[in-house]
Image: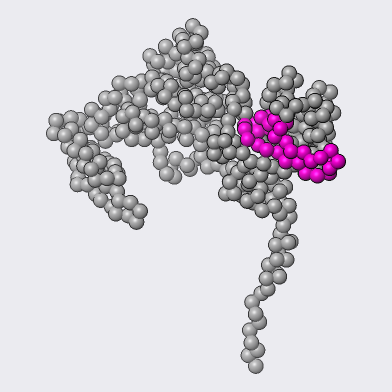
Amino acid sequence: METSYDVKIYKILTYKGARKTTHTVRWVVAGKPWREPFRTVALAEGFRSELIRATGKGEAFVIATGLPVSHRSKSAAMSWYTFAVEYVDARWPELGGNSRKNTAKTLTAVTIALLRAQPTQFAPVAVRTALREWAFNSSRRAEAPRDVVTILRWVERNSLPVSAWEDAERADEVLRAVDTRLDGRQAAAWSRKRHRRILNVVMKHAIRRRVLRTNPLPKGKESTAVTKTSNAVDKRSLLNADQAAALLDSIRRRPRGGKRLHAFFAALYYCGLRPEEAVAMRVQDVTLPGPDAADQWCELLIHTATPEVGKQWTDTGEIHEERDLKGRAEGETRSAPGHPALTRILRQHIEEEQLKPGDLLFQGENGGILAGSVIRRAWRGARKAVLPPHVFESPTGRRVYDNRHTRLTKWLNDGIPPAQVADWAGNSVPVLLATYARCVEGQLPDLKRRLEAAGDLPEPPDAG
């Protein structure tokens, strides 16, 4: 830790912008300028006074951070591992299962990057498992087996202090390590973006607890240049009508549970449901027309989602976690129309399975929630059986979720107003358009006719 007594502190610079006024404290340490903006003059004066008091006491300043040595005391005294465990325990009650899992993954990568030395007496996979599945899991940590406890004690002893983040070069090294997969290749853009998002929340927590004074992560363009992502759907993943029909028929003819799975996938395809919404539906959530109106539309009420997150990440110990609908207020519901073809499928499904109003609409073999592994295995099997090898290897319908993408795109291509599609799908209009705008096609001829019907500029008067 290089320090210097060569410190100059300047007057507060006040900038009055159109929306807010910023008060910036300026100082120089060993010739390197530093700036710290504040929203109020009182906060700026308080911070500047701390710097002046430190120089008055003859205190050295850290060249890498521009701050007095005393400002590093708390972050230097706490190891990163200890802080990360405390952070997990503080956030655990308010996080959902998937958020808990993703936080543990991020903190595992960071903790390994902030070790004084890499362990040689433990296998790398054992260290990662110990951190991800036990250290950063508040409900399981106390039950960790003896070999895991041994690993975690070694990590705690060899963890660098939180102050390591105050070294810009060290922070860059950690971020590069987090952005790198185990095989040495760069992680996917969406993964890097997720790590940054989680780490920013962690750093804000450190600032609130006064462990760190400022957020050490890159800001602005520097932080987003390598993590650009797009939520737009890949056109190649969409199914055409013949492919969808063949896939649904293949699933229906499966010798084990084919008819039940056929009804499930038909609901995804015809109504654009998310898989976690479909598995949570009850029979009473389906409004079917009368028995003599088989050629009429049905309606599905969606009110709950049960994503599969793993029993070690839920409070109940169940694999699935019951949640409110994505992007909706607590307790809010939505409905989606079901094509007459789906009406016939669901009516037959309910009758053959002898389902009652309170029963799950799509059940597993033992009557419980339909497992994600069964869903994925059935879909992959159907793709392999139906699609030519070159199509099977392509993105076409590769994910179960592509049924939803196909339906929402079809609604838009059929001219359904985006606001209505967004309501049926459970999206906002901006998200819907950003996700599916590139897939909307086939409307150009009609749009050209409308433009032509609007007329052209009037002919100029005859000059003669």
Q: Where is residue 195 in the image (x, y as percent from the top left)?
A: 49, 32
Q: Which residue lies at the image location 29% right of the left edge and 54% below the top edge? A: 16
Q: Which residue lies at the image location 73% right of the left edge and 61% below the top edge? A: 446
**Is 321 rendered above or below residue 336?**
above
Task: Name the image quarter holding residue 203.
Answer: top left
Task: Name the image quarter holding residue 365.
Answer: top right
Task: Name the image quarter holding residue 153.
Answer: top left
Q: Which residue lies at the image location 31% right of the left edge and 29% below the top edge? A: 210
**Is 202 rendered above or below residue 35?**
above
Q: Magenta part of the protein: which range?
A: 276-305
Residue 191 in view of the camera: yes
Quadrant for the N terminus, please: top left
- 56 or 399: nearer the viewer: 399
Horizontal arrangement in the rendering, residue 299 relative to residue 99 (left or right): right
- 235 or 280: nearer the viewer: 280
Q: Which residue lies furthest to the top in this view?
A: 146
Horizontal arrangement in the rendering, residue 225 relative to residue 70 (left or right): right
**Is 359 rendered above or below residue 391?**
above
Picture mark count? 0
- 410 or 47: nearer the viewer: 410
Q: Where is residue 136 in the image (x, y as percent from the top left)?
A: 47, 20
Q: Residue furthest bottom?
A: 464
Quadrant for the C terminus, please: bottom right
Residue 239 in view of the camera: no
Q: Where is residue 70 in the image (x, y as percent from the top left)?
A: 23, 27
Horizontal arrangement in the rendering, residue 8 relative to residue 356 (left or right): left
Q: Position of residue 135 (x, y in %)?
A: 47, 17
Queried whether the magenta region covers residue 368, the answer comes back as no
Asked which colour scheme the image uses, the reply is one colour
Queried whether the magenta region covers residue 301, the answer comes back as yes
**Is 460 rendered above or below residue 59?**
below
Q: Which residue lies at the image location 65% right of the left edge and 80% below the top edge? A: 458
